[in-house]
Image (spheres, rainbow, N blue to C red):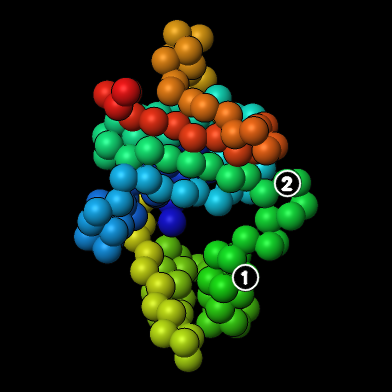
Amino acid sequence: MGVSHETSAFAVSSIRSWWFRDGRQRYANSKHLLILADTGGSNSATRSAWKDQLQQLCDCTGLTITVAHYPTGASKYNPIERRLFSFISKNWSGEPLRSYETILKFIRTTTTARGLKVGAFLDSKDYPLAVKPSAQRMRAIRISWHPHAPHWNYTIKPSSVK
């Protein structure tokens, strides 16, 4: 959870934090990460800053990242939205969210009978709006477009990988 703007930098920072807190231990032998994303907002299929930030994440972690965007209006089929956010909402039960601590408490205390436990952290970094990568940075992104729905499906490789 963040206190700043919802930007591509914030979205990728959240993924980076997850990777270094949990992901690299749980998936120690992984060389590839799949991200299921909607098509709007900070992680939009058309947002250049999103792809630039993902390239930086690839370079930092050594992971190859594949992104599959849900078509407009179809993000409700994302398993994270169905399996996670609905339980957070039930746990919250419409109580006023007056502080970050209250919000974090509701998220962190969300569990299910099937064993879901939710972690949450406060990101207090400022993420400025309207940051756009240069044309040179965009040309440096190691992106390959998938044959099926290439606008929504692509893979980005670390700069150091051949």
Residue 23 visible in the picture: yes
For the residue marked with disc 2, what is the amino acid?
Pro
Residue 124 visible in the picture: no
Q: Which structural element holds mark 1?
A: helix
In the displayed structure image, the side of residue 4 where residue 39 appears, left or right: right
Residue 71 shows which numbered tag? 2
As displayed, is residue 26 above or below residue 105? above
Q: Which label's residue is closer to the chain start, 2 or 1? A: 2
Image x and y of residue 150, in percent: 65, 32
Q: In which quarter of the image is the C terminus?
A: top left
Q: How many marks?
A: 2
Image x and y of residue 30, in percent: 30, 51
Q: Which structural element holds mark 2?
A: loop
Determine which quarter of the picture holds residue 151. top right
In the displayed structure image, the side of residue 97 where residue 124 appears, left or right: left
Closer to the camera in the image, 125 or 89: 89
Q: Which residue is drawn at 44% across and 32% down?
A: 156
In the displayed structure image, the side of residue 73 where residue 19 appears, left or right: left
Residue lying furthest right: 73
Q: Gap in Å between the C-alphas at discs 2 and 1?
A: 16 Å
As displayed, is residue 118 above or below residue 145? below
Please rate how many residues cluster around mark 2, counting C-alpha atoms within 10 Å: few if below 14, some from 14 to 19, many from 20. some
Residue 82 shows which numbered tag? 1
As displayed, is residue 95 above or below residue 140? below
Q: Residue at x 27, y 39 (%)?
A: 61
For the residue marked with disc 1, what is the amino acid?
Arg
Q: Which residue is drawn at 55% across and 64% down?
A: 80
